[in-house]
Amino acid sequence: MNRRPAMGVMIDGTYHADDPGPDTTEGGHFKRAEAKIRDWITPDGPYTPDPGRYHLYVAWNCPWAHRALLARTILGLDDAISVSYARPRRTDQGWVYDTEGEYADAELGVTAVHQVYARQRPGYTGRLTVPVLWDRRTEQIVSNESADIIRMFGLFGRGPDLYPSAHRAEIDAWNDRIYATVNNGVYRAGFARKQEAYDEAVAQVFATLDAIEDRLSGHDWLAGDSFTEADLRLFPTLARFDVAYHYAFKCNIRRIMDYPALWRYARRIYAMPGVAETVRFWVYKQGYFSPSELRNPLGIVPAGPLIDWSPDP
Ligand SMILES: N[C@@H](CCC(=O)N[C@@H](CS)C(=O)NCC(=O)O)C(=O)O
């Protein structure tokens, strides 16, 4: 029962489908690999903030890719950065694309994300993750780190400032805590291989959600008095929580809808212009309830829960 479906990894530009999968563990704890491609868009180049220059490879269900989709929409870059959406379920080729339809790649015509990474020079070694920010001018990947991609989107000079200098310390503190214990914390709970590892992770998830509930009981946003990057980075986890993490990752002490302030806040973000179009609840279920020998051997997707995301009147 310990075998996991192959996810694939690239070594010196060559794809290997027989990798043991992303949920590597140490003492039963899930460890997420660091992103490897971390170039930067700057006004001086070589990667300049030009509309029409970049393309995003994402999957609707990936919360890290969701960050990039949210930043693109909220910063008014929908017409400036094009996107290809992978199929919700990975195969032994990793994230895959169809040749036509909603899951096709109109940019390079690839049928798997590893084919994008294969174009990297010198040959890439590492995991084959989404999101990927592709530069069509140099035909290279600029970045495969969502935290960097959302910052870079701010450099296009459109939309609100998501990282205002007056609140950076607060934003950074929330980002660090939320990344470790919530964004990645739900994976640490869901992918834990030992009871103690799960117990620790799930306690941290809910300790941070409780702290967020406290903050939001007196404030509209996590940092300062406007929507910032900290809110943006929390939202993808909130959108997936009750529909997927609560059940598939055993994060079931409470649901987001059991937290009055947090639930009101989540629905307020969902109602912001363009945000609902970045959300696909059904795809989240298909993805998180994919066949997994450890978590869901038959790959059956549950029908519920049915959740009303409309904002408070
Ligand atoms: N540090 C990356 C993490 C991205 C990531 O782990 N994406 C997952 C999907 S949710 C993935 O593509 N995993 C494939 C793999 O590890 O083989 C980021 O935030 O951009």
Image (cartoon, rainbow, N blue to C red):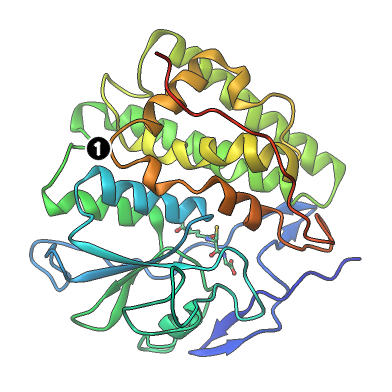
The quarter of the rendered structure image containing the N terminus is bottom right
Task: Decide: is 85 above or below 74.
Answer: below
Which residue is depicted at the point 63% across and 57% down?
A: 287
Residue 154: horizontal and vertical position, in percent? 20, 48
Q: Is mark 1 within 8 Å of ligand 1?
A: no
Q: Where is residue 108 drawn, in percent x and y?
A: 34, 84
Q: In the figure, 298 relative to 134: above or below?
A: above
Query: Which one is in front, 22 or 168?
Result: 22
Task: Please tell me in which quadrant of the rendered image residue 107 appears.
Answer: bottom left
**Outermost left residue:** 44
In this view, the residue in front, 110 or 1, is 110
Q: Few, some or many C-alpha atoms within 10 Å of disc 1 (few <14, some 14-19, many ≥20)?
A: many
Residue 240, percent from left and from top: 57, 41
The C terminus appears in which quarter of the rendering? Answer: top left
Residue at image coords 8%, 66%: 44
- Quickly name the residue at label 1: 162
Residue nearest the observer in this picture, 12 or 310: 310
At mark 1, the secondary structure is: loop
Residue at screen point 50% across, 21% down: 262
Q: Residue 150 location, x and y as percent?
A: 31, 51
| Number of numbered tags placed on the structure image | 1
Residue farthest toward the top in the current orientation of the protein = 218
Q: Against 299, is 309 above or below?
A: above
- Residue sitting at x 73%, y 52%: 301
Judge by depth and name the residue closer to the eye, 117 or 37. 117
Under mark 1, the amino acid is: Leu
